[in-house]
């Protein structure tokens, strides 16, 4: 699915250069469920941003579906992104001014090949799947955190992406809601979607097939989960 | 997708209701002001341009080389003589006006009647409702009425063929009805009669008399004629008809379009339309430009506001942009969304401006004297031009955030720090500085204009203008009964004194006069304006004597007839003003007393002479607007004159007017009494300044309001941005007052900077404006301080609420925000 080769990301301010990722090499195959762990500041989120094409690496190669996208301009990245990747964030990132339905629909809005009728159908289907159909007309502020994250997951899957990137999806949720989100992600993975998830929780990392541990911008260990 | 944009836009507007309101309303005010003033300026600048031949028509005027006075009239036969002598003068038309008693059946009233020649309509194309230009003035008894005049006297019936009487004796027949005079012409004409009728009424010879200047002359020049080259031929022309006169007078051409913008010459046409009430007073072009600039500034301030607020607003939406991008929106999608939204908002603001304009139109009409209706008077490019500006403002305000946000990688937007620092903040501060510089500049200008107008209204003018009533003496019967009237008026206890004169304050009707000194050569003439005044003139107007005495019946020599063949030599007295002494280098007033001045001239071959003994020196008096300098004056004692002036005690004015009316009707039965107050006339002298003052006051007030609305919104936005910083400061021990001070200072800095920009520019331009006045105020520091401190205080009050709210908030909330 994707391959990172000697990928480096450095942030530069006027005086200091901070290396967030240092020559990272990672392979992720299609259909995998990968957890990325590590202490605060180890580069987890930076890695996810680059994998999600929300940010450019400083050097190194990023091969996504046999294409090196590392130096691509934002417009080209946007195109690849919308066709292949869905996002789930710790803070949900729903647009406050849009209803639940409209927020989910957003993921299809920028796809010219989807008619408005089809959009409606797919949004309804996604809401049904996530159990939030009765909340379609509600605004995000009227929902609980767990419900909001389910809206975010619905939005992430509605465009049928090959891969879902989840940045601490359970970080703002209580354990019951967190568990539910993990079950939803597992179900999606079973249907064939590649999932890359950043998490702090060892427990939630257990849902993944493989865990990559980062420290100071470098991959320190990779452990495969014992088959369950 | 569009639907989604619209939904987001509307919900965002509603979420930030105050912000949205300020944004749209501010822009609407700016556009409304700009449109109204643009209309006003366009109207003013189009004066006389409605006439097809306007570019070829010039008014022939004359100027006294001795006094520098300019006259709107010219020697009566000069116009036709020029048409005869100069091939480049294609045609000449002469015009006279007179206020006459007009009677229709048993109705009678005074009306200003214009007299002109048959070719009037050939030069000035006016719209005929009935009758035709070819023969409208063909018959000596014909008269042309405007529609309003026809309606006033004949109601709904056709006026054509109806008769009316002029001056109680001259019967006229209506031969044409024309549309009312356009608002943009100097002519305040409602009744137009043939010049032959004027000749019959006032004695026919005057039309051919050189040296008499009661007629206005309009010349139609051949296309491409250079007026300067033509003027160069005038001295010879003058000498051809009046031997040697070119030494004392010159003729000048005044382009028709310039008349409206030239300070009134002597003998202008009446400014007020007696029937419609329209006032067509001259306008200082600089005042029009000041207004135009002020309006442009308000538009700039409003546009800056809009752009600033849209940019600030965009930063609230960084998350939305990021989320959209994460979900596949491209740079173009985002740019399109923001630009589209801003364009829509700007057009919405513009639509609101159209409504505001219609609402404000009547009020603006009173203030400016120019009637405005959006849908009637805004042809051509007027509205499209403003729509264009609205679109441009929308485009710019949408472009900036979209360029900034659309190109960024979403990860950076999520980090979301760049709006509080860096270029965005600099741009915003820069725009706020420009806004305030403009607002401060406008306040300074308004304050200076106000001071100058107040100075003009309150400056000691050398005479008393309160409680003086004047009555025009335009009939022989009034002049013949002057003494009877005076005696009658004086029987009332509140009537203090009565006089008559050829000249009165606000109405300088004086004539050129020249003296020689005994023993001096004929060439060394002393030139003055001569004023003919009756006994009690100086007492009535409270004009003080610097030396000597005023005219008095105790001195028989004060009143002498003009010399004639029987008495070719006359000795009499004269009173001079201080400026005459200064101009001639005569030293102090006391020394001038007793000196003699001579005037010699020839009439019908008889040598006549007058010897004047100087018996008094009067203090200088501003007879006209302070725009005009005081000229050398000689007061001579003569009966008659142009008006009677009555000084009253100021008490029981109703009783006084009642008494005057009673005396009047007992002495002069046939003519209605007309009284005016000198104080009212004086105000009229400054009508243009007053109007400019009121308009620019309103405009600069609006500029300040818009700027403050913008500042309020920006302050709210920045306060929010600084919540975290302030939280951290509080956690580390900063006190609320210290924080309020810090936040307030943050906003005062741009205002102080704005002062630095506004002061020198305002000083330069207002100093220029003041040079137009012969008597002007000095530019002190106070207008600058008023504007600067005022703006700072208003700005402070605007942001203080935000500053206090943010500084007092609980740091825990502030920090959790992150």
Image: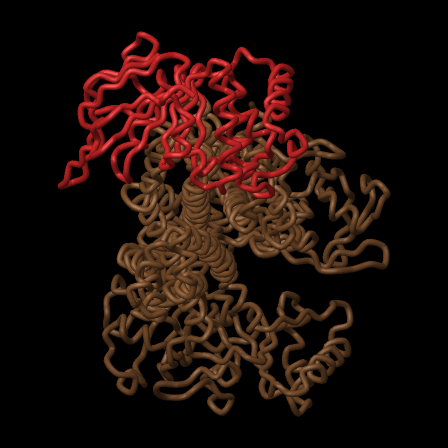
Chain colours: A red, B brown
Q: Position of residue B658 (x, y in %)?
A: 74, 81
Q: Along the line of sight, which residue is nearer the eye, A155 or A118? A: A155
For residue B810, what is the image quadrant?
bottom left
Q: Along the line of sight, which residue is nearer the eye, B474 or B150? A: B150
Rendered position, B725 above or below B595: above
For residue A79, what is the image quadrant?
top left
Is residue B709 found left or right of B609 in the rendered image?
Answer: right
> Which residue: 42% across, 66% down?
B808
For residue B769, what is the image quadrant?
bottom left
**Which corner quadrant holds the N terminus of chain B?**
top right
Rendered position, B756 above or below B135: below
| Residue B679 visible within the image | yes
Q: Where is residue B412 in the image (x, y as percent from the top left)?
A: 32, 34
Q: Where is residue B262 in the image (x, y as percent from the top left)?
A: 43, 51
Q: Along the line of sight, which residue is nearer the eye, B102 or B117? A: B102
Is residue B476 found left or right of B320 in the rendered image?
Answer: right
Q: Position of residue B176 (x, y in %)?
A: 74, 38
> Which residue: 29% across, 26% down?
A212
Is residue A216 found left or right of A147 in the rendered image?
Answer: left
Q: Along the line of sight, which residue is nearer the eye, B683 or B718? A: B718
Residue at the far left: name it. A15
| Residue B53 visible within the image | no
Rendered position, A142 above or below B742: above
> Which residue: 30% across, 67% down?
B734
How many numbered marks appear?
Answer: 0
């Amino acid at each position: 699915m994707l391959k990172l080769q000697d990928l480096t990301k450095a942030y530069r301010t006027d005086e200091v250069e901070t290396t967030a990722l240092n020559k990272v090499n990672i392979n992720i195959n299609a259909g995998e469920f990968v957890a990325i762990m590590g202490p605060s500041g180890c580069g987890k989120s930076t890695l996810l941003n680059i994998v999600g094409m929300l940010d450019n690496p400083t050097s190194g190669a990023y091969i996504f579906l046999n294409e090196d996208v590392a130096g691509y301009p934002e417009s080209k990245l946007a195109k690849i992104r919308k066709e292949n990747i869905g996002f789930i964030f710790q803070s949900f990132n729903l647009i406050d001014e849009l209803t639940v339905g409209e927020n989910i629909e957003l993921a299809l809005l920028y796809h010219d090949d989807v008619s408005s009728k089809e959009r409606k159908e797919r949004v309804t289907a996604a809401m049904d799947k996530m159990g939030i159909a009765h909340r379609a007309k509600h605004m995000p502020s009227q929902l609980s955190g767990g419900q909001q994250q389910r809206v975010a997951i619905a939005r992430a899957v509605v465009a049928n992406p090959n891969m879902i990137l989840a940045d601490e999806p359970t970080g703002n949720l209580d354990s019951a809601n967190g568990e539910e989100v993990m079950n939803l992600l597992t179900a999606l993975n079973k249907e064939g979607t590649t999932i890359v998830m950043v998490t702090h929780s060892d427990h939630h990392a257990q849902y993944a097939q493989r865990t990559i541990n980062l420290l100071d911008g470098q991959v320190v260990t990779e452990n495969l989960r014992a088959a369950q | 997708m569009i639907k989604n944009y619209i939904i987001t836009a509307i919900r965002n507007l509603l979420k930030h209701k105050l912000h949205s309101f300020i944004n749209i309303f501010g822009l609407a005010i700016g556009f409304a002001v700009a449109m109204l003033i643009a209309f006003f300026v366009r109207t003013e600048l189009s004066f006389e341009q409605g006439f097809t031949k306007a570019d070829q028509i010039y008014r022939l005027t004359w100027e006294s080389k001795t006094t520098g006075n300019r006259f709107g009239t010219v020697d009566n036969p000069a116009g036709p003589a020029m048409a005869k002598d100069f091939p480049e003068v294609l045609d000449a038309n002469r015009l006279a006006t007179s206020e006459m008693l007009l009677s229709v059946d048993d109705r009678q009233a005074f009306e200003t009647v214009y007299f002109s020649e048959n070719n009037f309509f050939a030069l000035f194309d006016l719209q005929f409702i009935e009758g035709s230009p070819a023969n409208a003035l063909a018959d000596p008894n014909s008269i042309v009425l405007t529609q309003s005049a026809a309606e006033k006297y004949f109601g709904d019936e056709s006026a054509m063929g109806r008769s009316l009487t002029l001056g109680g004796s001259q019967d006229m027949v209506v031969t044409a009805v024309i549309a009312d005079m356009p608002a943009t012409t100097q002519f305040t004409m409602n009744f137009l009669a043939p010049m032959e009728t004027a000749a019959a009424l006032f004695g026919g010879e005057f039309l051919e008399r050189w040296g008499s200047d009661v007629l206005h002359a309009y010349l139609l020049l051949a296309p491409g004629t250079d007026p300067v080259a033509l003027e160069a031929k005038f001295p010879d022309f003058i000498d051809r008809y009046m031997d040697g006169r070119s030494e004392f007078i010159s003729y000048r051409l005044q382009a028709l379009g310039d008349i409206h913008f030239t300070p009134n010459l002597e003998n202008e046409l009446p400014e007020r339309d007696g029937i419609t009430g329209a006032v067509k007073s001259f306008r200082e072009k600089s005042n029009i430009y000041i207004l135009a600039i002020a309006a442009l500034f308000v538009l700039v301030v409003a546009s800056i506001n809009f752009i600033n607020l849209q940019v600030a607003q965009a930063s609230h939406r960084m998350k939305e942009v990021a989320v959209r991008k994460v979900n596949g929106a491209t740079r173009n999608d985002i740019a399109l969304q923001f630009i589209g939204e801003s364009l829509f908002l700007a057009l919405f603001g513009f639509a609101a401006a159209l409504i505001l304009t219609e609402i404000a139109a009547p009020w603006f009409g009173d203030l400016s004297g120019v009637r405005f209706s959006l849908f009637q008077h805004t042809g051509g490019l007027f509205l499209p031009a403003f729509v264009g500006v609205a679109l441009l403002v929308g485009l710019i305000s949408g472009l900036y955030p979209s360029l900034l946000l659309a190109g960024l990688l979403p990860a950076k937007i999520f980090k979301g720090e760049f709006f509080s620092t860096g270029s965005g903040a600099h741009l915003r501060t820069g725009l706020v500085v420009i806004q305030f510089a403009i607002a401060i500049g406008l306040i300074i200008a308004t304050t200076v204009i106000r001071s100058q107008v107040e100075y003009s209204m309150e400056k000691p003018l050398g005479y008393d203008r309160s409680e003086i009533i004047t009555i025009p003496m335009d009939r022989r019967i009034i002049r013949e009964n002057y003494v009877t009237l005076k005696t009658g008026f004086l029987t009332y206890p509140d009537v203090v004194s009565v006089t008559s004169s050829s000249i009165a304050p606000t109405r300088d009707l004086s004539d050129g006069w020249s003296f020689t000194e005994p023993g001096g050569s004929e060439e060394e003439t002393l030139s003055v304006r001569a004023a003919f005044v009756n006994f009690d003139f100086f007492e009535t107007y409270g004009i003080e004597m610097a030396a000597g005495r005023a005219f008095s019946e105790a001195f028989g020599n004060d009143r002498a007839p003009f010399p004639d063949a029987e008495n070719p030599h006359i000795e009499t007295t004269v009173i001079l003003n201080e400026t005459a002494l200064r101009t001639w280098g005569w030293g102090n007033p006391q020394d001038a007393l007793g000196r003699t001045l001579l005037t010699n001239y020839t009439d019908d071959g008889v040598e006549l002479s007058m010897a004047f003994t100087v018996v008094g020196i009067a203090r200088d008096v501003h007879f006209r607007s302070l725009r005009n300098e005081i000229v050398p004056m000689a007061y001579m004692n003569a009966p008659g004159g142009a008006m009677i002036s009555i000084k009253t005690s100021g008490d029981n004015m109703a009783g006084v007017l009642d008494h005057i009316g009673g005396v009047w009707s007992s002495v002069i039965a046939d003519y209605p009494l007309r009284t005016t107050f000198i104080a009212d006339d004086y105000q009229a002298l400054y009508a243009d300044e007053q109007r400019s003052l009121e308009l620019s006051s309103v405009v600069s007030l609006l500029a300040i309001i818009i700027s403050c609305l913008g500042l309020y919104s920006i302050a709210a936005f920045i306060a929010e941005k600084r919540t975290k910083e302030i939280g951290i400061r509080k956690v580390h021990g900063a006190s609320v007052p210290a924080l309020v001070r810090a936040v307030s200072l943050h906003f005062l800095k741009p205002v102080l900077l704005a002062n630095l920009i506004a002061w020198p520019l305002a000083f330069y331009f207002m100093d220029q404006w003041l040079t137009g006045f012969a008597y002007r105020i000095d530019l002190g520091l106070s207008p600058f301080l008023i504007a600067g401190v005022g703006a700072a205080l208003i700005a402070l009050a605007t942001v203080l609420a935000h500053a206090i709210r943010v500084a007092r908030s609980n740091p825990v909330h502030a920090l959790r925000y992150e």
